[in-house]
Amino acid sequence: MKRRLTALVSAVSVLALSACGSGSPSGGGSEAPADAGSGGLTKITVGVIPIVDTAPIWLGDEKGFFAEEGLELDLQTATGGAAIVPGVVSGSFDFAFSNLISVMVANDKGLDLQFVANGASTTGEEGAGFGAVVVPEDSDIKSAADLEGKTVSVNNLSNIGDTTIKHVVEKDGGNPDNIDFVEVAFPDAPAALQNGQVDAAWILDPFLTQARSEGARVISWNFTEMHPELDIAGYFTTSEKVQSEPELVDKFTRAMNKSLEYAQENPQEVRDIVGTYTEIDAETLAKLTLPEYRPEFSREAAQTLGEAAAKYGTLSEAPNLDELLP
């Protein structure tokens, strides 16, 4: 439990702690973003986390959707926002992937970032999510409200995990101020739950599948319960790039949207491509609940998320969605 993730980590699905990218080394960026690539293509560097959520961009690259727009992708893997956000701000990354709260927090601290494409969304179906709050099978915790007064693990404090959990606890009649949130990396969460180090754990796949196979019981599908159309993460860049290089941004957005649509229509190809850039075995991949992949952001859901983050102190104020979303 002492191992902490210090990044503004994307809180959707499998963390990079469980996987290694098969592309470029993590933490790096091209020396000159948007350079001329091979065959006359424009080379762009994209910071990604090697998790199930980013499958569409890997799949779209393989299918040639970015090449059709004249783009050559250099996918750089990183564990989360601690490397990704500074990489975008410095210009090492042209675009990057992160969860909505992480980018909201960055903007709240004075950075000027903007999403240009969606990334991954909740399934909208309780019982079919890729993340949930779980308790031991014999726990007396039966609902979200029962988390009041309990110790609950999340991968990062003041991010999308505890924000959504606080929201559903309050909606269920509990007091979220009385929850003791502690940081536990997703790979360690099933053991922390079994050992009684925490009363409940927020876990994302593939560790959620592991925990449930060991007897853990779901008491909240917090993403879906917060909003059935909640977008979890997306691809962003600086507002300056959006204004100064609109054609490049449009090309990336078109290719990314096509990749999202293709991934949604071809779940088996999603599972296959994930196996090329992570160490998740085929048997586990077959059992995972995949995110929803769709081009459109739900402004209503983003507003709900942003207002909750401001209410619970993650943000100083609710974000301006006109500046944040495409």
Image (cartoon, rainbow, N blue to C red):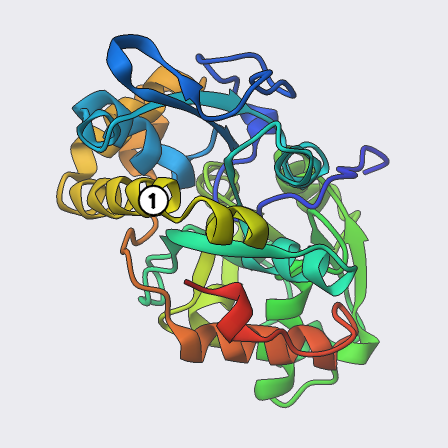
* Residue 208 in sight here: yes
Q: Residues within 10 Å of mark 1 (few under 14, many from 20)?
A: few
In the picture as drawn, the residue positioned furthest to the bottom comes out as: 173
User: At which x and y percent is residue 37?
Assistant: 36, 14
Residue at (40, 37) in percent of width and height: 54
* Tag 1 residue: 247
Residue at (41, 62) in percent of width and height: 326
User: At which x and y percent is residue 131?
Assistant: 48, 53
* Residue 140 in sight here: no
Instruction: Name the residue type under label 1.
Output: Glu
Compared across the picture, whether 293 is left or right of 186 comes to: left
Compared across the picture, whether 25 is left or right of 115 comes to: right
User: At which x and y percent is residue 108?
Assistant: 74, 64
User: At which x and y percent is residue 265?
Assistant: 13, 45
Compared across the picture, whether 134 is left or right of 38 comes to: right
- The answer to which image quadrant residue 104 occupies is bottom right
Q: Secondary structure at mark 1?
A: helix
